[in-house]
Amino acid sequence: MPSAITPQAAKMRLIEIVRRRSYGTDVEIKLASGRISNFYFNMKPTMLDPQGSYLLALLVLDALKDTACDAVGGLEMGAVPMAATVAAISVAEDQPMPAFFIRKQAKQHGTQSLVEGLPRGETLAGKRVVILEDVTTTGGSALQAIEAVKADGAIVLGVITAVDRLEGAAAAFAAAGVPFQAILTVADFQA
């Protein structure tokens, strides 16, 4: 049964949760991009919060509703809780969406795969996928994930991030010809 909450109401409540659980301005922090910042988003506390993860999944599914997406996933670790929650909530929303994740490097044991979460013998070849990211700065992590899924034969429809820091990712994705959408941006927290 589809959710009764509107996307706007979900976004406003998610901003409150992120502000309380995942946003900070009290330290200087080094980002994955290598840049130093005086504000940060650690989205794991929001993505592992029952209501935060639920609302984020609803908003991702809303962003996907008019796409022909076959699966969502992204680079470990940030995209894993997000992709898993989207997959779980997608069933209740009558919009089933399988998920996967990409390892930063293949394990030296087991299947030694970069792409995880697929049934044995299945690949992303020919599947239309959307890459998820928790926080986007320059887009480097998502571009790395895109390379990995394309090497597996996937067709990348775009990137959806929980929070865009507005520090160049949109331009990087545009230059790569990859559609990009942010659920939230840093501007939602600086008002």
Image: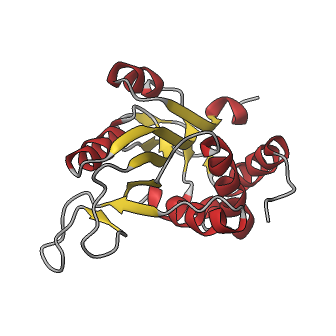
Q: Is residue 60 left or right of residue 143?
A: right
Name the image quarter holding the N terminus: bottom right
Q: Position of residue 114 (x, y in %)?
A: 23, 61
Q: Position of residue 166 (x, y in %)?
A: 53, 27
Q: Residue furthest bottom?
A: 110
Q: In this orientation, which residue lies closer to the viewer: 4 or 173?
A: 4
Q: Position of residue 81 (x, y in %)?
A: 52, 64
Which residue is found at the position 63% from the left and 41% from the top? Answer: 63
- Residue 116, compared with residue 71, is above or below; it is below
What coloring was used for the rendering?
Answer: secondary structure
- Please state the total of marks drawn on the protein image: 0
Q: In this orientation, which residue lies closer to the viewer: 168 or 111?
A: 111
Location of residue 3 (image quadrant): bottom right
Which residue is found at the position 33% from the left and 37% from the top? Answer: 140
Q: Is residue 37 left or right of residue 96?
A: left
Q: Position of residue 125 (x, y in %)?
A: 27, 52
Q: Judge whether residue 151 can be spotted in this image.
A: yes
Q: In this orientation, which residue lies closer to the viewer: 55 or 63?
A: 63
Location of residue 50 (image quadrant): bottom right
Name the image quarter holding the C terminus: top right
Which residue is found at the position 18% from the left and 71% from the top? Answer: 107
Which residue is found at the position 43% from the left and 20% from the top? Answer: 171
Q: Judge whether residue 34 can be spotted in this image.
A: no
- Residue 19, compared with residue 184, is above or below; it is below
